Amino acid sequence: MTMGVCLYLAIVAVGSCTLSASALSVLPESAVNTIDRGGIAVIPNFLSPSEVSRLRSDASNLYDDGNFIVDALAGYGAKAGAKDKASFESSKDRAVLPAYIPSQKKIGPFASNLGDVDGRRGLATTITALRSDLAKALDRPGLDTPDGGDNHEMSFTRFGPGAQLARHVDEHHEEVKGRTGWSRPTRRSISWLIYLNGEDWDANSDGGQLRTYERKFPSACSVGSRDGDLQLGWLTPTPNDPKERPVFLDGRRGGISGKCALYIDSNDGGRKVYLTKEFDSDPYLFLTSDFFIQNVLIKDHDLGARFHYLEQPKSKLTAYLGNDPGERVKDVAPHGGTLVAFDSVALPHEVLPTMERERWAASGWFHERQQSEP
């Protein structure tokens, strides 16, 4: 077995987690509570300055040697988002050094024998401990029972000068992905980043902040998914019901894919309270907006008025209607050594443009098994 494969298995190895919320190995309890209720956990100095410097040096050398993959997801400059091929400059886009390449079903350069293998192995050990903490404390045991080589994602990432990422969420319900929605055995559950920038990084002049759109009030219950049904939106608080309630999509009513209904948890958390009758995912989930859900699918006017998508489908109508007033902006500066982690489904976010410098990070997603194809 090659060292590269050994490193990769260290990243995705099944853990025998016996932690409790009061005995976490690398993560404070406050961070777990923040993630569970839909916020972003920010842990400064998660890695020491010497560890950050070592990993950044490794990433920079591997980039200079041509081992990174440009994914063309970021926008930059005056044509941000336009993807004008004639003016595209790979050095200004986002590039990644992945541990695994799903499209090719093979180990990626992060898990190879290139560069500082020991440094990346040390990082992988820390990330495995982080995953085990989250699996136990969030009651998501699937995080620690990986299935297949592409179950968990890990990479170095580099944003070139001017690069940015538009607002998005990292995972969506299977029914809004079209025909391929049920084709994968796992889905993203927790998103994480560890920034690898130098100690002199100044967010005011260097940019590159992670902008998140948290709720103004913490969720009344756990976010992200319920019995495999992923979250689609929120019911905002009212004087009579002062709770921020996550709304989940049952996408297989009667065991039939595409037969959908929206629901929330009951006050005691013991049952599902359906907000809508059954409806077809296509076209309703693809050609819709807050306004449509509020006034057509949810028949109770008072409940309907409270609904907001996590992330509305992009259209001229949604641009005109504006963003959810129940959100608040929280910016996180990309200071070296800082860990951020959040639910992949529940937290919209974007990356603000870097200025004249490269922005470095180690990043990835922990996966859980998704529902099997109906």
Image: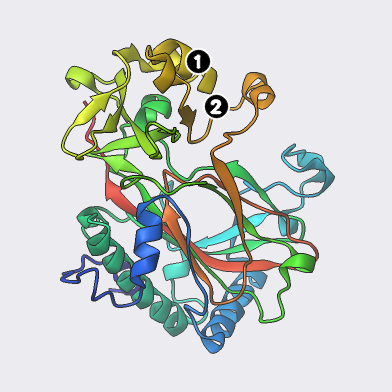
Foreground of the two, 310 or 259: 310
* Count of numbered circles in the view: 2
Looking at the image, the residue that sits furthest to the front is: 239
Q: Secondary structure at mark 1?
A: helix
Observer able to see residue 5: no
Q: Within the image, what quadrant is residue 128 found in?
A: bottom left
Residue drawn at x 27%, y 57% as measured from the top left: 138
Q: In the image, which is nearer the foreground, mark 1 or mark 2?
A: 1
Which residue is labeled 1 in the image? 292
Picture residue at 71% right of the left edge, 75% below the top: 201
Left or right: 82, with 222 as reference point: right
Q: Is residue 221 above or below residue 315?
A: below
Residue type for callout 1: Phe
Q: Quadrant of the N terminus?
A: bottom left
Residue 141 x %, y %: 20, 56
Quarter of the figure with the C terminus: top left
Q: Give the percent coordinates (x, y) of residue 14.
A: 21, 65
- Using the rendered image of the protein, determine whether residue 57 is visible from the camera's viewpoint: yes
Seen in the image, is 81 located left or right of residue 245?
A: right
Q: Three-letter amino acid code at disc 2?
A: Pro
Q: Residue furthest bottom?
A: 50
State the CA–CA distance, disc 1 to disc 2: 12 Å
Q: Which residue is mark 2?
A: 313
Q: Secondary structure at mark 2?
A: loop
**Residue located 62% across and 46% down the image:** 73
Judging from the image, the colouring scheme is rainbow
Q: Residues within 10 Å of mark 2 (few under 14, many from 20)?
A: some
Q: Earlier in the sequence, mark 1 or mark 2?
A: 1
Q: Residues within 10 Å of mark 1 (few under 14, many from 20)?
A: some
Where in the figure is residue 103, as x and y percent of width and height? 43, 46
